[in-house]
Image (spheres, helix red, strand yellow):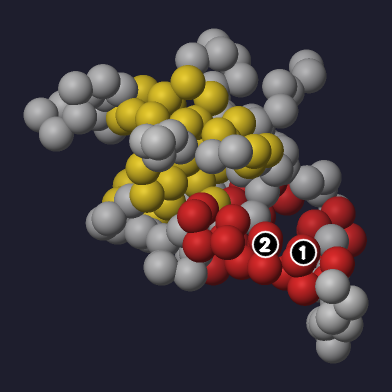
Amino acid sequence: MTKKHATYTNPNTGIAYPLFEAVYDYNVEVYASDLKKAVTGDPYKCVIALGLMRDKHVLEACIGSGKDGYVIFKADGMHPVDYAMHFTLPANTRRTLDEFDKNKKAKTTIIKLRAPTPGRTLAARSVLGKKRRAAIKAGAPVKKRANVNRPRITRLGVPHRPTPIIKNGAVSFPQLTP
């Protein structure tokens, strides 16, 4: 039995791209002038996604809710077809995104998308989730946080960005309604 590769499905086009974990950090320069075209709350048209799409190797970028971002790259020497890469967003990148969504402000800056650590990869999180669900089903106590995280709507006054839907190794985002 061969292992099925993970895929990222673009909800706008319906095209499924092979999904790989990033093995390197990726820096992108975000300009204040990107604010003219940027849309708050839209993972495909936020200020960071527009900065990423300025790169000639990037087809599309999706910066959703949480600490994950997906970038679709054009085919190159290592990959014969277009492909998607999973990156994680460090706290300072999330702060820039929150500031943009809250006030539609951003300074010209360099944003870093990081390669996921071994514990943040999609495969590792899937294994961890399965173990946790099995333990809870077996009667293990559910550990609650001492300090509950406040929701984004409470913290910033802006609604959540779309959360990716991950099922059987396939990642997609819900279709945005205008």
| SS label for mark 2 | helix
Viewer-side residue, 37 vs 120: 120
Q: Which residue is found at the position 84% from the left and 61% from the top? A: 151
Viewer-side residue, 67 vs 19: 19
Q: Which residue is found at the position 37% from the left and 49% from the top? A: 21
Task: Check disc 2 and report the residue beneath it.
Answer: 129
Tell whether label 1 touches label 2 (CB within 8 Å).
yes
Give the position of the C terminus as an image quadrant.
top right
Compared to residue 171, the image places residue 128 above or below, namely below
**Hey, what amino acid is under mark 1?**
Arg
Q: Is 50 left or right of 129, judged from the image as shown?
A: left
Residue 12 visible in the displayed image: yes
Residue 54 lies in quadrant:
top left
| SS label for mark 1 | helix
10 Å crowding of disc 2: few (<14), some (14-19), many (20+): few
Compared to residue 97, the image places residue 150 above or below, namely below
Q: Is 62 left or right of 17, judged from the image as shown?
A: right
**Hey, what amino acid is under mark 2?**
Gly
Residue 82: image x %, image y %? Answer: 30, 22
Q: Which residue is found at the position 65% from the left and 31% from the top? A: 173
Residue 6: image x %, image y %? Answer: 46, 37
Residue 60: image x %, image y %? Answer: 43, 26
10 Å crowding of disc 1: few (<14), some (14-19), many (20+): few
Q: Which mark is residue 133?
A: 1
Residue 85: image x %, image y %? Answer: 38, 41
Residue 169 lies in quadrant:
top right
Compared to residue 17, the image places residue 108 above or below, namely below
Disc 2 to disc 1, C-alpha distance:
6 Å
Residue furthest out toward the bottom: 146
